[in-house]
Image (cartoon, rainbow, N blue to C red):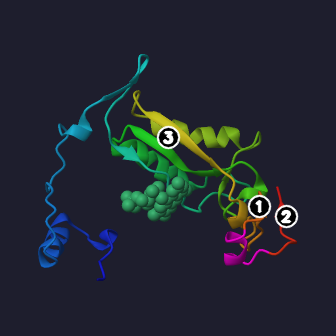
Amino acid sequence: MKYQAVGSFKSSYQFKAYLERMQIDLSFDDELDANCYLGQSYRLHKGFTIGNRFAVLPMEGWDGTTDGRPGPDMIRRWRRFGMSGAKLVWGGEAVAVSHDGRANPNQLLINDKNASSIAELRRELIYSHKDLYIGLQLTHSGRFARPYNKPEPIILYRHPVLDKKFNLDSESALL
Ligand SMILES: Cc1cc2nc3c(=O)[nH]c(=O)nc-3n(C[C@H](O)[C@H](O)[C@H](O)COP(=O)(O)O)c2cc1C
């Protein structure tokens, strides 16, 4: 059976109509109630309570600068993460720990030179909040690295299945 992607529904009504058509029993409210369970705070530890239970998952937009700093669209996105009201920003988006581990030429890259502009993303987030809990997802894309938009895989070890699947030969660089 083929299902329609949830992202293709532009309103809750469209989604409800689809569920009905497909005879799928999944009810939900049309409007978000701020007092619902997800709206309640969560005590993480003695010193910190997260303001509510809504979370922003990591979502890399491939829209940083080629030297790994945030671009204008990324800054706007993080500002909107902040404005959304979600209090758990769970990784923001993947930030490469080294140039050779970037998944694409526009991925954020954390290093001494870029640190202060990456800190700007945090400032955008906390602008209107004090009880956010923020993580930053650090990555090395390894066999999927594409720092210049073509594959430049670096692998930890020869994998009998994955090397074959992704056409890596014995010349591929080992970390
Ligand atoms: C455009 C886009 C970019 C994403 N980038 C990342 C990322 O950088 N790191 C990550 O761990 N997951 C990433 N994800 C996965 C999401 O965090 C999430 O786990 C996934 O979309 C499933 O949640 P959903 O069903 O609500 O979409 C990305 C997803 C999308 C759609």
Crowd rating for badge 3 (residues with CA inside 10 Å; few <14, some 14–19, many 20+)? some
- Residue at the far top: name it: 46
Is residue 83 rendered to the left or right of residue 116? left
Q: What residue did someone put label 1 on?
A: 155
Is residue 144 rendered to the left or right of residue 19? right
Identify the mark nearer the N-term, 3 or 1. 3
- The structure residue drawn at horizontal position 29% and vertical position 78%, both measured from the top left corner, is 3
Q: CA distance from mark 3 to mark 2?
A: 38 Å
| Secondary structure at numbered mark 1 | strand
Type of amino acid at the residue the image marks with label 3:
Glu
Height in image: 77 above or below 22? above
Query: Looking at the picture, how far across and down is residue 112, in whole percent?
Result: 76, 39
Type of amino acid at the residue the image marks with label 2:
Ala
Is residue 99 rendered to the left or right of residue 38? right
Identify the mark nearer the N-term, 2 or 1. 1
The disc at residue 124 is 3
162 inside magenta stretch: yes
- Nearest to viewer (mark 3 / mark 1): 1
Height in image: 70 above or below 43? below
Q: What residue did someone put label 2 on?
A: 173
| Secondary structure at numbered mark 3 | helix
- The structure residue drawn at horizontal position 29% and vertical position 30%, both measured from the top left corner, is 41
Q: CA distance from mark 3 to mark 1?
A: 35 Å
Q: Residue 28 appears in which quarter of the rendering?
A: bottom left
Q: Which stretch did the figure color magenta?
A: 160-168
100 inside magenta stretch: no
- Residue at the far right: name it: 171
Q: Residue 131 appears in which quarter of the rendering?
A: top left
Type of amino acid at the residue the image marks with label 1:
Ile
Is 159 or 130 nearer to us in this picture?
A: 159
Quarter of the picture holding the N terminus: bottom left
